[in-house]
């Protein structure tokens, strides 16, 4: 069975971020009368900032009261209904293959569920695991989600298609899966593995190359 990661594998994670920033920009303007919060967040993201975007956006806008509202902004960002779409190659691949397929994704449970719903992949991917719902400490590279997919996949070859070598491939490789890294332009994670154990067996630019890569890989 082929199992996919979600963020930066089936769609671009930055699109979720930009959707969230637009949502927060509208919210902050409506509730607090402060304009430009969404564009300020986006500019910081595009400049490479990842960890303190909301704090820095408040500072950039001179919105001192906003610093105390950052937890509220984070919650609203995670809960917003995202405006995102599958990457065209991912949509083509899923539309042309019958499955069944699996999905393993990290991140806050409701946020990931909102992404899954927005992308319309529930009818296409039968076996879905949001690791947050498995309990604390069960995110990748913990083996729990991979074990669940092995039960769903039966005795056939298991394949994990993902993007982040820091955590995505080391566990399925150790369990005998074939691993495939998708290296999309615009992805948020470093595509270089920290060592050989974390490197995927195969690297692809997009899912249009997946069939030929799997056909040439060892069974």
Image (spheres, grey):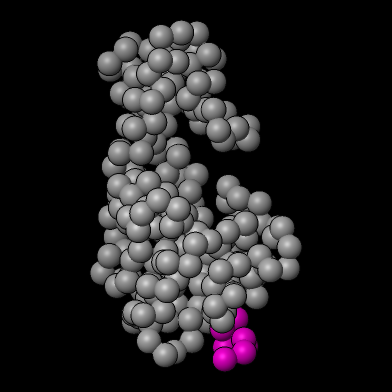
Is residue 218 shown in magenta?
yes
Spot occupied by residue 175 in the image (x, y as percentages of width and height): 54, 78
Spot occupied by residue 142 in the image (x, y as percentages of width and height): 49, 62
- Quarter holding the N terminus is bottom left
- Main SS, magenta region, reads helix
Residue occupying the point 73% across, 63% down: 195
Q: Quadrant of residue 125?
A: bottom left
Residue occupying the point 38% across, 12% down: 34
Q: Quadrant of residue 151?
A: bottom left
Residue occupying the point 50% across, 44% down: 14
Residue, far right = 195
Residue occupying the point 45% across, 10% down: 63
Horizontal placement of 112 versus 191: left or right?
left
Q: Quadrant of residue 97?
A: bottom left
Of residues 176 and 52, the one nearer the viewer is: 176
Q: In the rendered image, is residue 10 in sight?
A: no
Segment colored magenta: 212-219
**Residue 125 drawn above or below residue 120:** below
Spot occupied by residue 103 in the image (x, y as percentages of width and height): 39, 67
- Total numbered labels: 0
Of residues 201 and 11, the one nearer the viewer is: 201
Q: In the rendered image, is residue 14 in sight?
A: yes
Of residues 85 and 188, the one nearer the viewer is: 188
- Quarter holding the C terminus is bottom right
Spot occupied by residue 61 in the image (x, y as percentages of width and height): 50, 12
Horizontal placement of 85 versus 210: left or right?
left
Is residue 213 shown in magenta?
yes
Residue, far front = 136
């Amino acid at each position: 069975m082929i199992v996919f990661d979600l963020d930066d594998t089936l769609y671009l994670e930055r699109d979720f971020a930009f959707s969230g920033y637009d949502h927060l920009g509208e919210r902050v303007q409506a509730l607090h009368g402060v304009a430009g919060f969404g564009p300020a967040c986006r500019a910081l993201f595009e400049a490479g900032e990842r960890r303190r975007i909301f704090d820095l956006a408040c500072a950039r806008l001179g919105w001192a009261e906003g610093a105390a509202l950052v937890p509220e902004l984070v919650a609203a960002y995670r809960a917003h209904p995202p405006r995102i779409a599958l990457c065209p190659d991912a949509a083509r691949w899923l539309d042309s293959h019958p499955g069944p397929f699996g999905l393993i994704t990290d991140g806050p449970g409701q946020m990931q569920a909102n992404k899954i719903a927005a992308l319309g992949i529930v009818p296409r991917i039968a076996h879905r695991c949001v690791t947050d719902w498995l309990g604390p400490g069960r995110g990748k590279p913990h083996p729990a989600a991979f074990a669940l997919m092995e039960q769903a996949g039966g005795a056939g070859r298991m394949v994990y298609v993902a993007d982040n070598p820091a955590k995505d491939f080391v566990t399925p490789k150790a369990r005998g899966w074939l691993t495939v890294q998708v290296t999309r332009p615009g992805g948020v994670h470093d595509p270089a593995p920290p060592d050989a154990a974390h490197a995927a067996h195969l690297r692809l630019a997009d899912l249009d190359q997946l069939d030929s890569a799997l056909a040439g890989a060892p069974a």
